[in-house]
Image: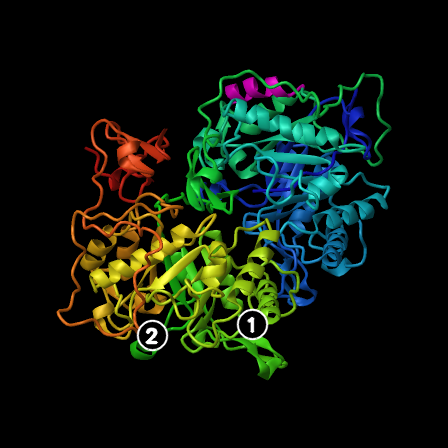
């Protein structure tokens, strides 16, 4: 659950209880703080059974002490599956009836309508929460942002322009809550300002705009700090922020990490003029209401915690996730929310039709100033969970969050992104990545329709690939359709996006698959070129134009009219250039990187898949003017095709020498070069000859000998269809590759070490002279301008034993030899010790905390 920071509504204490005011400056706030709960997703239902499902909203309002209830969620802002792109709703089992056959995902919910009215009769506020964990929060343009504000106002608030399709009939909700966890962050200032303008035109009701950002400051989606974010440019229009102080390093049990982060949110609120949002302490309502039991505060801890913060200027109350977990967490005859309510003082809010004027007999608390923020509470902080982590020293890649097994860091170009796994998943800190190509159904013709390549959504659910390259965009400038690109995804998608563009496809199933993959933490790239593709870029201007075309069609561009995968935002572009010209690739790569870097909401990749002979005929490097020579520093990964050529993985010295050349190239790129991946065919028939295939035992021997070379990034497999048809002892080939990828991430070194000369390189596999490369040129001579990386050895470094030393073990995640429930992270010779959550042991095979039955503990 995530949301945005929003502006405040003010509360006053009267002899009859607490009454709501219209929006006034925060300095007039006094009286009891508020209790907020999220309802509608039945989060505890699956774990507790139908008898304990979340109660109807009417019952919740009659039996609980919540002051504000956020009905969750409106998940799709612009649902392309129904006319006018009206929103899509999801309220779990509470409501599943469409408002009409014309709008199948816009629901009609009489029971929730009754509940809203019952809550309001009892003086409670009811908000419509938009977004949620699976929601797409993209607002494509300022105009669409304003349009969406009007849509919400007419469907849920005081508008009257959509009377026949209002989900809650005549019930008028009390505001909108922004729980934004997906999509792009642009255009939220326009949305918030427009929504506030509509609300202010209705003087009969004191509407709220609220948000629920995660605790790290600033929030990735809403800000503040950065101009152009919703909270920075429109924070004065926001009433409440329900900060999720859980599922993160800044949770309520983290001592100074919690208090310092709270101070940052309060300081932001204080500098908003004329007023900023009230800041709420968001908590899970049960041990299972968050991703770990350590984020939950039992009643006694809750009391201690809240007494220390409740009097800080700007604190508005407590938020609980969610009502279903609350009703299933009864302690000594009382729900958890009862204990939270006791900490807030006061009585349940009585209903008021027109709010009375503010009471001014009490002196308001002093405002928070940016010069002197609220004092931190002097509790002992745990060891800094992320303070020692720096992308500047770590290099590009994915790294585990030392404080939370469900979180990870992504480093890209010195920028740091902190991300979370989907609910129920943990981050697997294996250091190298597994890449697969999908979309060409290569094995289909020989395996039959029953064994055709599975849909992308199934691939992401059932395989271990970290990155999937959707293949292919085959023609860069197709003159049959005005120069727009042409796509080919075999049988997966054949529907033209329009009659005007017959070879530019619209692929709903692939769109669903991309979103499913990304929800599971996988990257999805658009691969351009392929064996039949024409990679010609006619001039520098056309090269830059093509970069813009790709960014708008597949990534974060704003031109949404012709996007093959709709609102899905892909994670980058892969260059599999095997035909056409080889000019103007530096201009193309640099322009594409510039566009990617301008969109800081996502860490995009540029990758390539050259054949193994060095240098590649199309991409280089070595020749000035080639893409890799002049722009290699802007490329993230190279998936080298070590097959179909003399330098394949079974060719002994020809393979090792060629690999060393690619690694040496990467090492000399400044400030960084691409990670080098070992590309393999996934079965005997996936390449031009069975000799290029490495069975699992040979794969193990080969990869163990190269995995620790500086600059190695992982394994690439061609392709997913052959993989699903090559099942060995009950496991796909990719499962065997996945098992080889444990160990430490090794970013490319800037200056490669001298070659090791104590042993001779392995001889070629064949007794005859190797065949000539596929290209017409002779194999290039070794690179002599600098010392290459060390030749490949056949031994892997020994595992750590006894007294553990990061100096000898190397970077990575290692088992603690003295305690199976602990593990050690080494980074730059520094050692960090961590413990698994209660009941789990560290599994050194997959390098994550695991159930004891899966771990052999000596």
327 and 553: which is toward the camera: 553
- Name, please, the residue furthest toward the front: 785
Question: Which region of the structure is painted magenta?
Answer: 299-311
Quote the CA–CA distance across marks 2 and 1: 40 Å
Q: Is residue 9 above or below residue 528?
A: above
Callout 2–callout 1 Cβ contact below 8 Å: no
Q: Is residue 649 above or below residue 92?
A: below
Number of labelled discs? Answer: 2
Residue 6, quarter of picture: top right
Let me know if residue 381 is in the magenta part.
Answer: no
Main SS class of the magenta portion in the image: helix
> Disc 2 marks which residue?
777
Q: Is residue 212 left or right of residue 701?
A: right
Q: Is residue 711 left or right of residue 65?
A: left
Q: Which residue is mark 1?
A: 506
Residue 159 in view, yes or no:
yes
Label 1 element class: loop
Place of residue 548 in the rendered image (x, y in percent of width and height, measured from the top left): 61, 65
Comparing 115 with 847, the one in front is 847
């Amino acid at each position: 659950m995530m949301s945005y920071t929003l502006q405040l509504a003010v509360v006053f204490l009267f002899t009859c209880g607490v009454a709501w005011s219209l929006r006034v400056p925060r300095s007039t706030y006094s009286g009891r703080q508020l209790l907020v709960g999220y309802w509608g997703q039945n989060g505890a239902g699956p774990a507790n059974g139908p008898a304990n499902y979340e109660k109807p909203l009417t019952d919740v309002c009659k039996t609980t002490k919540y002051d504000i209830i956020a009905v969750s969620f409106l998940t799709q802002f612009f649902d392309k599956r129904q006319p006018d792109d009206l929103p899509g709703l999801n309220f779990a089992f509470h409501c599943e009836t469409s408002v009409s056959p014309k709008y199948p995902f816009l629901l009609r919910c009489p029971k929730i309508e009754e509940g809203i009215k019952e809550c309001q009769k009892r003086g409670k506020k009811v908000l419509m929460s938009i977004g949620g964990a699976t929601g797409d929060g993209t607002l494509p343009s300022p105009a669409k942002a304003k349009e969406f504000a009007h849509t919400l106002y007419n469907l849920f608030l005081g508008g009257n322009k959509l009377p026949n399709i209002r989900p809650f009939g005549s019930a008028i909700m009390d505001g909108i809550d922004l729980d934004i966890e997906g999509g792009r962050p642009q255009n939220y200032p326009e949305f918030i300002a427009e929504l506030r303008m509509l609300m202010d035109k209705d003087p009969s009701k004191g509407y709220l705009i609220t948000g629920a950002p995660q605790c790290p400051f600033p929030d990735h989606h809403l800000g503040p700090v950065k101009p152009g974010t919703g909270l920075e440019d429109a924070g004065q229009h926001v009433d409440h922020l329900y900060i999720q102080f859980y599922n993160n390093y800044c949770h309520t049990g983290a001592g100074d990490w919690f208090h310092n982060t709270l101070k940052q949110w309060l300081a932001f609120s204080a500098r908003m003029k004329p007023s900023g949002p009230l800041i709420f302490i968001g908590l899970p309502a049960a041990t299972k209401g968050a991703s770990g039991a350590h984020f939950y505060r039992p009643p006694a801890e809750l009391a201690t915690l809240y007494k220390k913060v409740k009097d800080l200027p700007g604190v508005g109350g407590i938020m609980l996730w969610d009502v279903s977990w609350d009703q299933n967490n009864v302690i000594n005859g009382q729900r958890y929310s009862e204990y939270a309510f006791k900490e807030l003082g006061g009585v349940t809010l009585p209903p008021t039709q027109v709010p009375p004027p503010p009471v001014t007999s009490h002196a308001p608390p002093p405002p928070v100033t940016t010069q002197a923020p609220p004092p931190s509470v002097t509790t002992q902080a745990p060891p800094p969970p992320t303070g020692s982590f720096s992308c500047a020293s770590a290099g590009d890649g994915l790294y585990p969050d030392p404080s939370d097994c469900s979180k990870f860091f992504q480093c890209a170009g010195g920028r740091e992104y902190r991300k979370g796994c989907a609910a129920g998943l943990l981050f697997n800190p294996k250091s190298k990545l597994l890449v697969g190509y999908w979309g060409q159904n290569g094995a289909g013709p020989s395996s039959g329709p029953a064994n055709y390549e599975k849909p992308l959504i199934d691939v992401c659910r059932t395989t271990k690939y970290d990155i999937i390259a959707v293949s292919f965009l085959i023609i860069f400038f197709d003159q049959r359709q005005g120069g727009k690109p042409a796509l080919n995804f075999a049988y997966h998608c054949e529907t033209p996006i329009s009659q005007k563009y017959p070879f530019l496809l619209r692929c709903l199933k692939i769109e669903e698959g991309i979103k499913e993959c990304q929800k599971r933490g996988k990257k999805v790239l658009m691969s351009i070129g392929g064996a039949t593709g024409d990679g010609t870029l006619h001039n520098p201007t056309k090269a830059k134009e093509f970069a813009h075309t790709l960014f708008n069609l597949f990534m974060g561009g704003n031109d949404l009219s012709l996007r093959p995968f709709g609102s899905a935002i892909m994670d980058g572009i892969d260059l599999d250039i095997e035909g056409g010209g080889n000019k103007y690739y530096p201009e193309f790569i640099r322009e594409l990187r510039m566009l990617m870097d301008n969109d800081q909401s996502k860490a995009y990749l540029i990758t390539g898949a050259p054949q193994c002979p060095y240098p590649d005929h199309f991409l280089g490097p070595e020749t000035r003017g080639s893409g890799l020579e002049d722009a290699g520093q802007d490329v993230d990964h190279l998936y080298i095709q070590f097959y179909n050529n003399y330098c394949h993985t079974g060719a002994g010295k020809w393979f090792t020498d060629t690999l060393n050349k690619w690694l040496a190239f990467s090492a000399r790129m400044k400030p960084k070069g691409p990670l080098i991946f070992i590309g393999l065919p996934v079965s005997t028939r996936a390449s031009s000859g069975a000799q290029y295939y490495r069975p699992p035992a040979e794969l193990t021997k080969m990869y163990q000998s190269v995995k620790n070379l500086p600059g190695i990034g992982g394994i690439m497999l061609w392709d997913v269809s052959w993989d699903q048809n090559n099942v060995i002892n009950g496991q796909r080939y990719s499962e065997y590759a996945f098992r080889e990828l444990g160990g430490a991430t090794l970013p490319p070194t800037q200056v490669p070490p001298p070659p090791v000369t104590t042993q001779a390189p392995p001889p070629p596999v064949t007794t005859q002279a190797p065949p000539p490369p596929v290209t017409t040129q002779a194999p290039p001579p070794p690179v002599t301008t600098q010392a290459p990386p060390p030749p490949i050895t056949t031994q892997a470094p020994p595992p750590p034993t006894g007294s553990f030393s990061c100096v000898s073990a190397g970077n990575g995640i290692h088992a603690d030899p003295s305690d199976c429930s602990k593990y050690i992270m080494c980074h730059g010779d520094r050692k960090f010790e961590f413990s698994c959550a209660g009941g789990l042991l560290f599994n050194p095979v997959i390098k994550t905390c695991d159930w004891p039955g899966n771990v052999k503990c000596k």
